[in-house]
Image: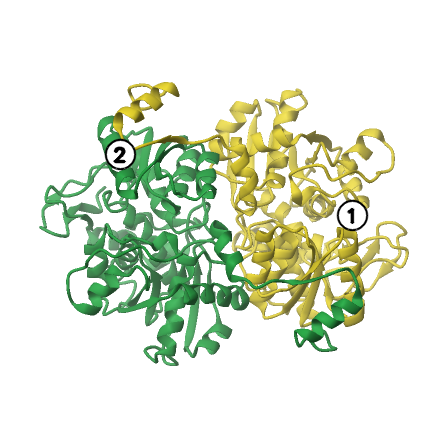
Chain colours: A green, B yellow
């Protein structure tokens, strides 16, 4: 990879050759992939990009840590739609608002971007098996992307994992090990198994290539905005890998001169589980928290990528915002009703944060904001059901319909 | 619409001006939209198309029954991926196999194509409200596409409708009327309400524009295949609107000279509910059947678009195939494991049919087949759960993992 210099520890600065199965630094720090931006600038221009037919995350291959000969992975990951939402902007009191619907990915979450990268790197490493430990979107996206590439997956989940997610995994042919114990115990068993069998490791806080996959969401947002930088990009935050990836993509674009300034990040966490935001707000080191939220994908009390995430929020001059479960479910309805976008609870947490910041007067009419929806609401129908009221329930009788409409204030015009 | 001549009854041949709120013929027959292909040929060439940036169903606007001034609808509908699947082709004994994953649409089904068209035509008609009666994907796609466009929806569902689908509808802000009665009674109440209030009617067997939206799946398949015509296109069949739309798209392309021959259709129905296939197989008129299948989206015992569907299958020299629920769920696993595509039961019925025809020796090594997956498996997690076996369930203990692997025949190499 001529355009990649090395992996560099974010904690101690030690560098490592960018081999395909790179993991963490010997000091325990997470690595960051360092590029040769001059080499990239010589090959990638906005015009080159504009003429490229590929509409997936592999559109940006000059900015990705893969060999020139590495083929795109089979599923169409990325190039999700960016919708301008003038009615919602008006309602919230924002200048402009865009919603990036990353639930429109093959397995219905942003995690497909990292899992496709894992598959590409596993192929470079000559691996036939990829493993991870996860309860949610990382697992299903890995299982789906690996299946399409003909690779096997071993996935460790705690036995409390929702049946629906296990069904997705098993439909994709993963070997699923349901561990009777906590998530920590699940992770521990997966680590021992990965060490023993040498499976390729898909864990975004261990394998430094994965947030390079996630960063493609930033590359797309900026190209879809025709390189006009918004004031803020809002996203939900769990273990920290996604917001770190988002920031890395923005910095890459700045380094190669595609954008002339950087937006500020909005880090949205659940009020019941916000260790990273609490660290930013208090100026103290982060401390573990309970995982007290229904937004399961970001219920991470011990964030595994705290260093990169805190660095990203601070470097960007970012805002933090913590939202209750009620605010999250209200945002789900708001996005559904106003934009036709159905996000899972963690997926709409960024939008819930944007709404709360508007109400607090911290952002407003002068601001252009992008809100990333990170996963599809069909992943968690149970919480959506609980949040929706009851439908009008009547026999097949026009008089009963008229009475029900009158009771709901629906007038004679049927509107 | 200079390129649209009129709507023509498929039963009696009577023609009607193509007003935006066109419904059925006075004889009760369904209308077909008739184009002026010479006018279209003068404006649309393969080169024009190749240079077009739009990646949605509105890419094909010269072939769609909308005014030149009608804007694309807000959600990104269409341009779903077409995957070549050499490993599955090999396994089934086919020459080449392509899977069109139409679960990759905003509300996760092919029905988004019809609902986006309904929204476009409702806007032309100046309507503020759209209504339909449905239990499934038509309803949720209408609710989502209308919400994004700022239109209201009234949706009538039988009270037996799964809670998950009702939750989707209500998240999108539809007014949902849950009718305590059969589907026929539900339809009847919706018809009275639509007549009374003059809401725009989104019912694919009444509104002739909707299958014009559905036909874009055929336009995309052919462009994605670089206009090389496959031998067969397989799709699941319920009320008949979708296969009729598919065929219309192919005939349009043939009429404007973009393709030089027509593929044969494969009409896949559930063995427990196959009134259209039975009519083809027996050469007799179709007769109602019980709705005895778990593939709810195609459990249509009284198909509402039988005429267009039967005509399409016959004109194409098509094949029929009826698959059991077990064969449907086996196809779901096969597509998941081999292709990383998770389809709902009705969504994978076409692929189940292709497999069955291969086994019967009716198609094989000389054939190129496209199989359309019409909806995402996340829409019906319950059936997927029932079809998956149990995961390996153990405490966090390497010895227990080794024993479990040995029991499953997983060897010392962890593969």
The residue sitting at 59% across, 70% down in the picture is B150
What is the x, y in percent for residue A366? 36, 80
Q: Quadrant of the C terminus of chain B?
A: top left
> Is any atom of residue B54 visible in this view?
no
Residue B51's disc number:
none
User: Is label 1 in contact with label 2 (beta carbons under 8 Å)?
Assistant: no
Report which residue position mark 1 lands on.
B305
What is the x, y in percent for residue B250? 68, 44
Which chain is disc 1 placed on? B
Which chain is disc 2 placed on? A
What is the x, y in percent for residue B280? 80, 33
Q: How many marks?
A: 2
Q: Nearer the viewer, mark 1 or mark 2?
A: 2
> Is any atom of residue A161 visible in this view?
yes
Q: Are marks 1 and 2 on the same chain?
A: no
Secondary structure beneath label 2: helix
What is the x, y in percent for residue A52? 41, 51
What is the CA distance from the residue labelled 1 to the residue labelled 2?
A: 55 Å
In the rendered structure, the answer to whether residue A192 lies left or right of residue B191 reads left
Q: Quadrant of residue A415?
A: bottom right
- Label 1: how many Cα within 10 Å (few below 14, some 14–19, many 20+): many
Q: Quadrant of the N terminus of chain B?
A: bottom right
The residue sitting at 32% across, 64% down in the picture is A271
The residue sitting at 46% across, 67% down in the picture is A330
Report which residue position mark 2 lands on.
A189
């Amino acid at each position: 990879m001529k355009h990649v210099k090395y992996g560099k520890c974010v904690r101690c600065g030690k560098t490592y050759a960018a081999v395909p199965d790179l993991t963490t630094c010997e000091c325990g720090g997470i690595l960051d992939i360092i590029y040769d931006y001059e080499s990239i600038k010589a090959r990638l221009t906005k015009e080159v990009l504009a003429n490229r037919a590929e509409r997936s995350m592999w559109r940006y291959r000059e900015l990705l840590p893969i060999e020139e000969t590495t083929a795109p992975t089979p599923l169409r990951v990325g190039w999700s739609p960016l919708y301008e939402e003038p009615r919602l902007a008006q309602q919230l009191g924002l200048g402009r608002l865009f919603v990036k619907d990353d639930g429109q990915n093959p397995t219905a979450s942003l995690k497909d971007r990292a899992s496709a990268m894992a598959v590409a790197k596993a192929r470079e490493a000559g691996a036939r098996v990829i493993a991870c430990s996860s309860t949610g979107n990382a697992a299903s996206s890995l299982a789906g992307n690996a299946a399409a590439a003909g690779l096997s997956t071993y996935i460790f989940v705690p036995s409390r994992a929702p049946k629906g997610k296990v069904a997705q995994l098993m439909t994709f042919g993963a070997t699923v090990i349901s561990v009777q114990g906590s998530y920590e115990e699940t992770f521990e068993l997966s680590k021992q198994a990965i060490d023993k069998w040498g499976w390729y490791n898909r864990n975004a806080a261990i394998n430094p290539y994965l947030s390079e996959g996630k960063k493609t969401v930033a590359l797309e947002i900026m190209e879809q905005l025709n390189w006009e930088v918004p004031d803020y990009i809002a996203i939900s935050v769990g273990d920290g890998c996604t917001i770190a990836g988002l920031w890395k993509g923005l910095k890459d674009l700045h380094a190669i001169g595609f954008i002339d300034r950087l937006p500020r990040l909005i880090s949205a966490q659940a009020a019941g589980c916000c260790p990273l935001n609490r660290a930013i707000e208090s100026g103290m080191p982060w401390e573990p928290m309970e995982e007290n939220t229904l937004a399961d994908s970001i219920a991470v009390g011990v964030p595994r990528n705290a260093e990169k995430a805190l660095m990203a929020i601070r470097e960007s001059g970012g805002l933090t915002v913590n939202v209750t479960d009620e605010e999250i479910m209200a945002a789900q309805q708001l996005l559904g009703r106003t934009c036709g976008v159905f996000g899972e609870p963690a997926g709409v947490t960024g939008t819930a944060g944007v709404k709360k910041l508007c109400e607090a007067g911290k952002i407003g009419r002068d601001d252009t904001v992008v809100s990333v929806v990170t996963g599809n609401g069909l992943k968690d129908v149970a919480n959506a059901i609980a949040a929706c009221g009851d439908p009008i329930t009547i026999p097949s009788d026009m008089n009963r319909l008229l009475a029900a409409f009158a009771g709901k204030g629906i007038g004679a015009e049927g509107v």
